[in-house]
Image (tube, rainbow, N blue to C red):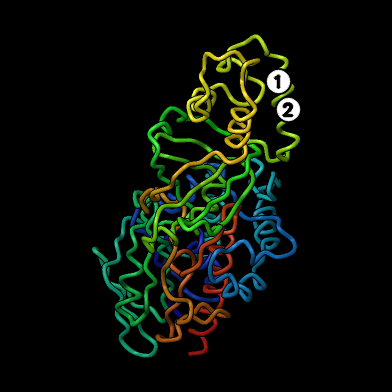
Amino acid sequence: MKKIIVIGGGPAGMMAAATAAENGAQVILLEKKEQVGKKLKITGKGRCNITSAEEENFIAGYAKNGRFLYSALNEFSNWDVIRFFISRGLKTKVERGKRVFPETDDAEDVVKILYDNMKKAGVKVYTNIAVQKINHLNANTFSVISDKDEFLADAVIIATGGMSYPGTGSTGDGYKWAESLGHTIVEPRPGLVPLVAKEEWIKELQGLSLRNVKTTAYQADGKKIGEDFGEMLFTHFGVSGPIILTLSRKIGDYLAKKQGDVNLEIDYKPALNEEQLEKRILRDFEKYSRKKFKNSLDDLLPQKLIPVMVTLSEINPEKPVNQITKEERKKLLSLLKRFPITIIGTRSIKEAIVTTGGVNVKEVDPKTMQSKLVEGLFFAGEILDIDGYTGGYNLQAAFSTGFVAGKYAAKISASN
């Protein structure tokens, strides 16, 4: 029986370990924290968006290197993930945006199933063990040196994740080991991360959540970066929420080039064109004709947003609505459709949901997840230079690459 060591007790590592054991290998999983699945337990605000129910172009859910996942998704698809959990007693549900969650809304249940699945398959799990070095001794032998012991194996699967939420164990250790074994690391940066705004007034909107808005991002030269529709959130430093996180990947790429700030525009009324919105404003102004301007926007905007909107419009807040000019009304309309925010940066990688960058996928066989440089070395999950948008795509990549790495690590090491 061939020995396989899996390093990392996240979704990719647990899936890889169980799959390798089910394929006849003797498997040890090493986790440096006191328990497995720490980051997984806080995923999706503790609800755990396990995958997407997207049926047509799943690969479009990845910002970079999605094509690398074709084989892995074919071996273990989003429907396989759903069946995996349902067959083990955890029912799922599909929410807006085709996001798949456990019916219990509890990430702890997801972790428990992955852990129980490993134990049932015969995986030995060691926690509180910090791996320090991986040595490739010869064609069929690896030495994994930890702070407590040395382990020998026929194959090693590195599934240590990225660098986001380091308190859960994701501190980028795997990059160092992969590099020491000859692999190229694409510079890790924050992905799916909140954005930092230049404007001071942004603090006045902290905590304001908006639904059904459209955001569009532009480079300093006016070239469009991207757009999205859905939910967003104002914070004390800038903006966050699903549509902001989705745009943050491309915005972060642009900001990294240091070619200027990003101009973000919010359309608060995307369902209305400008002509329709003007009629709506006129109707409201007629309704509140005797009110002051600052008291006339309650039907158009959330209460918290009104003072900022009034200030930016440069219309006298005390001005009676029936005295507002056509030019002033046009300025208000423009703000409602193109509310400007200057983005000067992203929050740190510690606050990112995922890490962009990682092991260069050109050096990894997409059909097996085995290194093209070191026989018997496999990778799974976020350590690879793959990152998806919000909606379950990153966990799906972890499950699919973990499944493939575990399956072929067992098969290849057995054939050796």
| Mark carried by residue 385 | none
Q: Residue at (74%, 61%) from the top-left corner?
A: 55
Relative vertical location of residue 181 with respect to residue 347 in this rendering, above or below: below
| Residue under label 1 | 284
Q: Is residue 198 left or right of residue 402?
A: left
What amino acid does circle 1 point to?
A: Asp
Looking at the rendering, which quadrant does residue 142 occupy?
bottom left
Toward the top, the furthest residue is 290
Disc 2 + disc 1, Cβ < 8 Å = yes
The residue tagged 2 is 280
What secondary structure is marked by label 1? helix
The image shows residue 372 at horizontal and vertical percentages of 45, 86
Closer-to-camera residue (374/223): 223
CA neighbours of label 2 inside 10 A, class few (<14), some (14 to 19), many (20+): some
Q: Position of residue 82 (x, y in %)?
A: 68, 56
User: Where is residue 245 drawn, in percent x and y?
Assistant: 51, 49
What amino acid does circle 2 point to? Arg
Q: Secondary structure at mark 2?
A: helix
Distance from disc 2 to disc 1, alpha carbons, whole Å, reads 6 Å
